Amino acid sequence: MIGRRAAGRHSGPEPDGSDETSPVILELTGVTRVHGEGERRVVALREADLAVRLGELVAVMGPSGSGKSTLLNLAGGLDTPSSGEVRLGRDVLSALDATGRAALRRRRVGYVFQDLNLIPALTAVENVALPRELDGVAVREARREARSALAEVGVVELAERFPEEMSGGQQQRVAIARALVGPRRLVLADEPTGALDSHTGETIMRVLRQRVDAGAAGLLVTHDPRFAAWADRTVYLRDGVVVDADRDDRASDLLVGARSGRSGSSTDDLGD
Ligand SMILES: Nc1ncnc2c1ncn2[C@@H]1O[C@H](COP(=O)(O)OP(=O)(O)O)[C@@H](O)[C@H]1O
Ligand SMILES: [Mg+2]
């Protein structure tokens, strides 16, 4: 669905987002994912097409069971399609073996899981540094990058704390920092604002927005139109089908208020 956005409300490049010449970092072409067989057969995603460019933050919305997590898992190479093709940059994921996919994912994709998946025995800075260390970055450098990512989400002072010593909102920020650490440029977030109060949710959206504007890309599952309003466009799923991959004018009209807050106050609330 690339190409439609520029034809809409904007003409020419966006001041801080992507334009039609930004490289496509993620592309799904005719992607179908089927689970089970016979009576248990479920088509979790059907013939999905989606392209995300650097500089774009794309929201994914749809009812429970509509295929949102499936889409994200396929985009990040955590799952493989039954048919169709997923590309990360120039790499076709299905052309790689599991080890190759894992390496690519570690280098390029930051994933914020619905249940966060922080490792309880590691401190915040250790959790965030882990993917970099796994990727061969020296411990000292990985920790430096981790602190920088923690600072980006406003919780560097929690670096030495363990997950159980943090609030839910603080843990959420650490999980986001882990997704942003290092040079990774595609952030996939499955309801990162799920259990958060709207204040903390806004803070997280601001961080994602800033990172994307600085040259990354994001795909974000959310149920909340206020958070989707931070995205450049919204992809709607219903029963595994992308029903609308355009910016929804009804939604954006409703959400002008929320969106305008994005570059307004820079006072990062720390109230978790
Ligand atoms: N591993 C699986 N095995 C069988 N069915 C699955 C599996 N994962 C997802 N599904 C089914 O695929 C559909 C889409 O699931 P999901 O992508 O998790 O939806 P959402 O994230 O929008 O709630 C649902 O009907 C779900 O039950
Ligand atoms: Mg889900």
Image (spheres, rainbow, N blue to C red):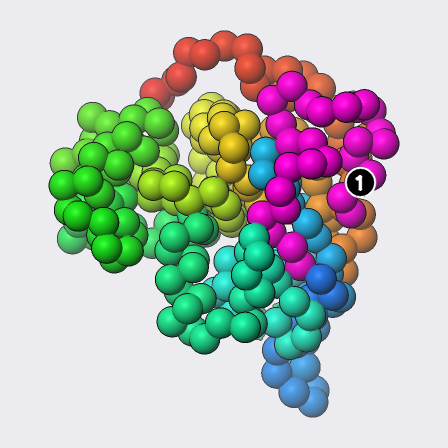
97 to the left or right of 14: left
Q: Position of residue 123 (x, y in %)?
A: 17, 43
- 161 sits left or right of 52 in the view: left
Give SS at disc 1.
loop
The answer to whether residue 32 is above or below residue 242 is below
Tell me residue 39's x, y (percent): 70, 87
Q: Which residues are magenta?
A: 1-28
Looking at this view, is 41 or 145 the one in front? 145
Report the residue at 45% width, 12% height from top.
Answer: 266
The mark tally for this picture is 1
The answer to whether any part of residue 127 appears in the image is: no
What percent of the width, then of the height, locates residue 159? 19, 34
Residue topped by disc 1:
3
Rendering quadrant holding ligand 1:
bottom right
Q: Quadrant of residue 260?
A: top right
The secondary structure that most of the magenta stretch takes on is loop
Residue 79, given in percent of the width and then of the height, sits at 52, 68
Q: Residues within 10 Å of mark 1 (few under 14, many from 20)?
A: few
Which residue appears at 55% of the width and 10% of the height? 264
Does 152 lie within the magenta span?
no
Quadrant of the rendering where the C terminus is positioned: top left
Asked whether 71 or 37 is in front, the reply is: 71
Q: Depth check: 5 or 200 in front? A: 5
Task: Residue at 34% x, 40% y: name it.
Answer: 181
| Residue at x 57%, y 19% (from the top left corner) | 262
From this viewpoint, which residue is outermost toward the bottom? 38
Q: Is mark 1 within 8 Å of ligand 1?
A: no
Residue type at the position of mark 1 = Gly
Q: Is residue 153 above or below residue 69?
A: above
